[in-house]
């Protein structure tokens, strides 16, 4: 497993300019999402009664907000904007995935990458797989969301709520992880440009699911550990340096994502030999 991580690291560093590109993409996405949330929440908060409001004042504020949401079309433009942002992400993300996954498999020894070629050659199958995965991951929400809301409204305590929702939530998370690994294998097959690539790579992933999943979980654990460390540093050591570290972590997180994908590709490639 160490060898796969080392080879994945070498591939990730070779694609560092793509890491910068993905970092800027995530930065712009976060900025627009922040501005959207701020445009919705700030006007509402300005109407909230301040200076130790009474219970009646808070109740009046909640009643007015409920009336505006349920009886007017005040949310309509925000829903359209949120839908547009979601659609843009659903269109752009698979393009970046296609370019990166293709380049990981076709980068030359001299350091040349094939990011743009990957987008041109593999965007259609990768987009289809990306959308299919998203639909399958979200499908259980049709059944789980109403039951989770019912549990939230009728649970007598936090422990009671957790007992009702944790098993289903845990199963949903495992379902999402399994789908992600299998569809990642299929996307690697789609970008390999080999005859029967999707079927072959999917078969390899299923046959060697345990080492493939173990490596993936290890890389995700490393990323989560670094994220917790940076968050803890921001809380304990507040200041300008902590702010720089926190902002710089987003670049590190993007590098970790590319490193993870490169390591996952390397372990599947080795199992095909």
Image (cartoon, rainbow, N blue to C red):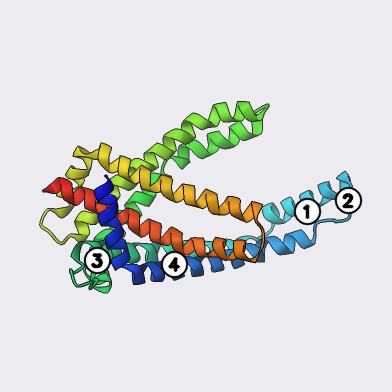
Q: Nearer the viewer, mark 1 or mark 3?
A: 3
Sequence-first disc among 4 and 1: 4
**Label 3 belongs to which residue?**
103
**Residue at point 22%, 43% (across, down):** 205
**Label 4 belongs to which residue?**
23
Please, what secondary structure does the residue beneath circle 1 have?
helix
Q: Marks 2 and 4, Cα distance to the nearest angstrom?
A: 42 Å
**Residue at point 33%, 41% (across, down):** 178
Q: So how many labels did they put on this image?
A: 4
Rendered view: 96 above or below 214: below
Residue 251 position within the rendered picture, expressed as x and y whole percent measured from the top left: 46, 64
**Label 2 belongs to which residue?**
52
Sequence-first disc among 3 and 2: 2
Q: Marks 4 and 1, Cα distance to the nearest angstrom?
A: 41 Å
Sequence-first disc among 1 and 3: 1
Sequence-first disc among 2 and 4: 4
Quarter assignment of residue 252: bottom left
Please, what secondary structure does the residue beneath circle 3 have?
helix
Residue 222 position within the rendered picture, expressed as x and y whole percent measured from the top left: 42, 48
């Amino acid at each position: 497993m160490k060898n796969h991580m080392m080879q994945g690291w070498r591939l990730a560093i070779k694609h560092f300019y793509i890491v910068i590109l993905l970092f800027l993409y995530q930065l712009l996405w976060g900025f627009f999402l922040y501005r959207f949330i701020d445009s919705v929440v700030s006007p509402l908060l300005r109407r909230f009664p301040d200076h130790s409001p009474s219970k009646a004042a808070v109740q009046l504020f909640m009643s007015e907000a409920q009336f505006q949401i349920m009886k007017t079309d005040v949310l309509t433009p925000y829903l359209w904007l949120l839908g547009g942002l979601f659609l843009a992400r659903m269109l752009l993300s698979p393009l970046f995935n296609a370019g990166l996954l293709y380049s990981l498999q076709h980068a030359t020894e001299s350091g040349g990458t094939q990011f743009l070629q990957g987008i041109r050659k593999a965007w259609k199958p990768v987009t289809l797989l990306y959308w299919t995965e998203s639909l399958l991951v979200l499908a259980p929400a049709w059944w789980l969301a109403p039951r989770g809301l019912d549990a939230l409204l009728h649970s007598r305590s936090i422990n009671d709520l957790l007992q009702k929702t944790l098993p289903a939530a845990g199963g949903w998370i495992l379902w999402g992880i399994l789908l992600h690994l299998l569809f990642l294998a299929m996307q690697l097959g789609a970008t390999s440009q080999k005859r029967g690539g999707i079927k072959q790579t999917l078969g390899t992933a299923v046959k060697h699911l345990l080492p493939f999943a173990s490596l993936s979980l290890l890389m995700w654990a490393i990323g989560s550990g670094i994220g917790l460390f940076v968050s803890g540093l921001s809380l304990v050591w507040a200041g300008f340096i902590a702010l720089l570290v926190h902002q710089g972590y987003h670049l590190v997180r993007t590098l970790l994502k590319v490193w993870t994908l490169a390591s996952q590709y390397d372990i599947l490639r080795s199992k095909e030999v």
